[in-house]
Image (cartoon, rainbow, N blue to C red):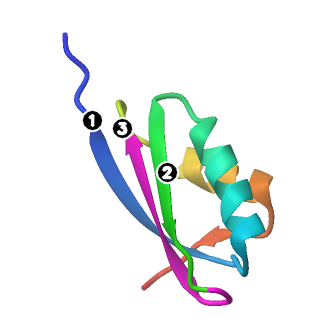
């Protein structure tokens, strides 16, 4: 059975700088199946985080990774 890449976009609050984006990227890349993370940083606002993976991501795992990285949360747009 062949793995299919999926792309998930999340609205994330709490990031203010490149260091924040780096911490979030590192934690999300540690999730099983994640192959790439791209962040459109809006300092102090709601940033867009795009995650490419070979598996379906569970929001609880994403939330856990954000909490591990720092004071970042999934946000409503």
Q: Label 3, on which residue?
A: 56
The quarter of the displayed image where residue 17 is located: bottom right
> Magenta stretch: dominant SS?
strand
The percent coordinates of residue 35 (x first, y second) are: 45, 35
The quarter of the displayed image where residue 77 is located: bottom left
Query: Is residue 58 among the parts visible in the rendering?
Result: no
The percent coordinates of residue 54 (x first, y second) are: 35, 30
Tell me if residue 13 comes above or below residue 73 in the rendering.
below
Query: Is residue 38 among the parts visible in the rendering?
Result: yes
Q: So how many labels did they put on this image? A: 3
Q: Label 1, on which residue?
A: 5
The percent coordinates of residue 21 (x first, y second) are: 66, 65
Which of discs 1 and 3 lies nearer the camera? The answer is: 1
For label 2, the SS is: strand
Of pointers 2 and 1, the one earlier in the residue sequence = 1
**Label for residue 37?**
2
User: Of 40 and 49, which appears nearest the observer?
Assistant: 40
Which of discs 3 and 2 lies nearer the camera? The answer is: 2
The percent coordinates of residue 65 (x first, y second) are: 67, 49
Residue 2 included in the magenta stretch of the image: no
Residue 49 included in the magenta stretch of the image: yes
């Amino acid at each position: 059975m062949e793995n299919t890449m999926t792309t998930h976009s999340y609205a994330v609050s709490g990031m203010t700088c490149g260091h924040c984006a780096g911490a979030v990227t590192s934690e999300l890349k540690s999730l099983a199946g994640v192959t790439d993370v791209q962040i459109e940083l809006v300092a102090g606002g709601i940033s867009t985080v795009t995650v490419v993976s070979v598996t379906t991501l569970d929001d609880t795992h994403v939330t856990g990774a954000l909490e591990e990285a720092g004071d970042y949360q999934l946000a409503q747009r």
